[in-house]
Image (cartoon, helix red, strand yellow):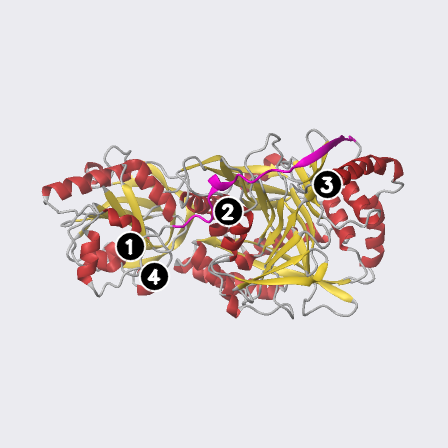
């Protein structure tokens, strides 16, 4: 048996698909609402004959706007004798076809849990076996007023907003067409599975009683209309020989930063640092690129069809590769040829790629319209293949000196003998010295250009306009603070101070030839191994001040506004995972975590790769930009944000940085609480480098402009404290 699911480019569609498949046992095939030319009704009819029923999913926009609904109206309006269930936008289309008025809500509900009350004959069909009053999640700016002169649409459920009843469910009096306004697929909705099962039983009974002919066709698996991602790589081919060798050093008085400081100043060794400076981080990774050998991958959305390959520290050694597909396929093929099988030691990193992907490497961004920031193609992907590295196990306080190069025993031995000497030879505190240097320079030479409040408020109002129209449930509005820093200031000094003053689990220092990133991010985007993946979104931020307690912060962050923001991202990420995986669960939902400078509302979502043909890189490639930095639905939100933010590049900010190891372990953080610099930035001067601090926050209909402005200031200040 098969069910057709129509997607209106929503960010919750695959949550719905999973709910339907697990509730019915049927195979669900997903298509976009504009994937057909419905002028050819005969072709459509032949396609629909292959399905037992249709589910029309949610989406942004208005039911009377053809660009928003595509072919959905034709499914209902042709009086088709096929069972249909419309959800949110699908519900609104069904109602509007019979003359019912669709108005804007006075009290808009985006990510809010509300009571749904069953009425009429609802408990005899769609809500059979469901409590007459149950809780479900609403994501809608529009609502339906029943003004149907034909009385074709009959009410099945309402919810109460103040003194007004808001329609929540209907059925067609003549055809097997049903609709619900709320979102049964949300993680906080009750009885979603039961409602879907009821519709499925109604559909099967109708098909049987009406003698409807259903064509069972195996070719559906290969139909061009079906949304079906193709795996980027085959995990079963990870069988290359492993040359990993390492030595361990135990030292309770040696920090990751002290090791890096010694490498830089005493050994003149370049490094790429991923530093877990606070919980829940367990490991720090120091990648040690080799001049003239370690390969660097560079990709720019300015010239999207090519990739530049070079070696570390050799600007004349460059190779241009034409892309046959995407940067994601290129990186996947690059790593697939080097991947190893499992190794005995459960180390997080055994050699591989370290670097970043910018915000603009994600989907739905119109790169052609973006403002230029550099006088050469901007580096949107920057990855270095690391053969030598040092790992710091923070829990066991062990250092691993490691290499995957053949015949590299001499280097391992030499480095293992060198590190213990740091404790003896160091005669100064690297962080104290850096603070003294920067304090003197900051008051004299660094110029700060903070965001313009008036412009931010105008952009806030634009967000509200789109939110109230139903084009988005949440928009993560961002802006930038600019800093003119004398080019004789060492960026490593800035990082050391930031890591001390704002320690974070996903701190990083990445210095490439054409760009630099200093990050104190608290937010994991995605981590994975061969068994499972984990995403850890943060939505809800509160300053950790002397008069703020954990209990007080929890009370503030567990308000409808903050919880609504977090819930939307949780539902969005579940959708991203269900696009590839069958098993997804949420072990932590909207819990408060304390950091040195802020309190955060955090959720954890995990997915299992068991019996899946996909790997972590598939999820990573399809999930950018991070949902916590865009809003939902993601496609429409990204498009709106680019317009609202006046086509300014976010660049490295809002992207991700991390590693992908040869044992297929990987961990990537969202680049927030960070500053970055382009070597070829158009605003550099002969004496200063321009550094950028991006900051923003989720705007919902419950947001207050002053409150959002203050929250954004807290995030900028968490980085600026490195300079004051």
For marks 2 and 3, the one nearer the N-term is 3
Few, some or many C-alpha atoms within 10 Å of disc 1 (few <14, some 14-19, many ≥20)?
many
Q: Which residue is mark 3?
A: 408
For marks 1 and 2, the one nearer the N-term is 1
Overall secondary structure of the magenta stretch?
Answer: loop
Left or right relative to 169: residue 492: right
Q: Indicate whether residue 292 is drawn in magenta.
A: no
Q: Residue at x 39, y 42 (%)?
A: 186
Q: Residue at x 34, y 55 (%)?
A: 8
Image coords of residue 492 (percent x, y): 76, 51
Residue 544's disc is none
Q: Which residue is mark 1?
A: 92
Looking at the rendering, the stretch of residues picked out in magenta corresponds to 229-252
684 up-or-down from 575: above or below: below
Few, some or many C-alpha atoms within 10 Å of disc 2 (few <14, some 14-19, many ≥20)?
many
For marks 4 and 1, the one nearer the N-term is 4
Structural distance between the alpha carbons of marks 3 and 1: 66 Å
């Amino acid at each position: 048996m098969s069910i057709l699911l129509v997607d209106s480019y929503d960010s919750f569609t695959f949550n719905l698909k999973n709910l339907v498949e697990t509730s019915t046992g049927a195979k669900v095939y997903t298509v976009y609402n504009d994937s057909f030319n419905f002028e050819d009704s005969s072709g459509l009819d032949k396609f629909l004959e292959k399905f037992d029923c249709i589910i029309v999913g949610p989406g942004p926009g208005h039911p009377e706007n053809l660009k928003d609904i595509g072919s959905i109206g034709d499914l209902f309006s042709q009086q088709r004798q096929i069972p249909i269930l419309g959800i949110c936008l699908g519900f609104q289309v069904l109602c509007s076809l019979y003359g019912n008025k669709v108005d804007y809500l006075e009290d808009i509900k985006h990510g809010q849990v509300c009571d749904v009350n069953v009425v009429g004959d609802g408990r005899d069909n769609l809500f059979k076996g469901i409590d007459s009053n149950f809780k479900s999640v609403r994501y809608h700016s529009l609502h339906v007023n029943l003004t149907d002169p034909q009385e074709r649409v009959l009410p099945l459920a309402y919810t109460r907003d103040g003194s007004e009843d808001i329609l929540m469910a209907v059925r067609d009096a003549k055809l097997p067409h049903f609709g619900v306004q709320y979102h049964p697929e949300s993680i906080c909705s009750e009885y979603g599975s039961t409602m879907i099962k009821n519709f499925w039983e109604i559909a099967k009974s109708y098909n049987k009683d009406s003698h409807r002919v259903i064509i069972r066709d195996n070719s559906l698996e290969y139909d061009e209309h079906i949304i079906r991602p193709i795996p980027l790589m085959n995990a079963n081919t990870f069988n290359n020989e492993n040359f990993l060798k390492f030595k361990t050093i135990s030292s309770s008085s040696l920090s990751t930063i002290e090791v890096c400081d010694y490498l830089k100043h005493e050994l003149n060794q370049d490094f790429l640092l991923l530093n877990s400076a606070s919980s829940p981080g367990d490991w720090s990774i120091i990648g040690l690129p080799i001049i003239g050998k370690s390969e660097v991958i560079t990709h720019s959305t300015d010239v999207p069809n090519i990739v530049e390959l070079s070696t570390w520290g050799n600007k004349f050694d460059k190779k241009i590769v034409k892309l046959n597909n995407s940067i994601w396929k290129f990186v996947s093929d690059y790593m697939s040829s080097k991947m190893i099988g499992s190794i005995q030691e459960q180390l997080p990193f055994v050699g591989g790629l370290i670097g970043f992907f910018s915000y603009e490497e994600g989907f739905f961004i119109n790169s052609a319209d973006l403002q230029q920031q550099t006088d050469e193609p901007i580096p949107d992907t920057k990855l270095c293949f690391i053969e030598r590295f040092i790992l710091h196990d923070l829990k066991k306080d062990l250092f691993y000196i490691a290499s995957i190069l053949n015949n590299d025993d001499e280097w391992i031995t030499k480095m293992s003998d060198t590190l213990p000497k740091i404790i003896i030879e160091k005669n100064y505190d690297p962080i104290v010295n850096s603070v003294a240097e920067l304090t003197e320079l900051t008051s004299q030479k660094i110029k700060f250009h903070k965001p313009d409040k008036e412009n931010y408020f105008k952009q806030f109002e634009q967000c509200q306009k789109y939110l109230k129209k139903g084009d988005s449930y949440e928009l993560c509005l961002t802006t930038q603070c600019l800093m003119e820093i004398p080019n004789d200031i060492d960026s490593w000094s800035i990082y050391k101070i930031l890591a001390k003053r704002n320690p974070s689990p996903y701190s990083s220092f990445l210095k490439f030839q054409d760009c630099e990133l200093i990050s104190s991010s608290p937010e994991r985007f995605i981590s994975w191994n061969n068994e499972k993946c984990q995403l850890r979104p943060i939505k809800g931020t509160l300053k950790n001040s002397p008069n703020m307690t954990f209990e007080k912060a929890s009370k503030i962050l567990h308000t409808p506004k903050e919880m609504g923001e977090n819930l939307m991202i949780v539902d969005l990420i579940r959708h991203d995972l269900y696009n590839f995986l069958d098993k997804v669960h949420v072990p932590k939902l909207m819990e408060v975590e304390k950091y040195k400078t802020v309190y955060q509302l955090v959720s954890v979502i995990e997915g299992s790769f068991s019996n899946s043909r996909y790997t972590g890189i598939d999820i990573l490639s399809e999930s950018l930009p991070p949902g916590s930095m865009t809003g939902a639905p993601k496609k429409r939100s990204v498009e709106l944000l680019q317009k609202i933010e006046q086509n300014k590049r976010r660049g490295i900010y809002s992207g991700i940085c991390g590693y992908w190891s040869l044992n297929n372990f990987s961990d990537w953080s969202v680049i927030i609480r960070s500053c970055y610099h382009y070597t070829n930035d158009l605003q550099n001067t002969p004496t200063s480098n321009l550094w950028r601090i991006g900051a923003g926050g989720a705007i919902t209909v419950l947001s207050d402009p002053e409150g959002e402005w203050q929250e954004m200031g807290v995030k900028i200040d968490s980085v600026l404290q490195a300079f004051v």
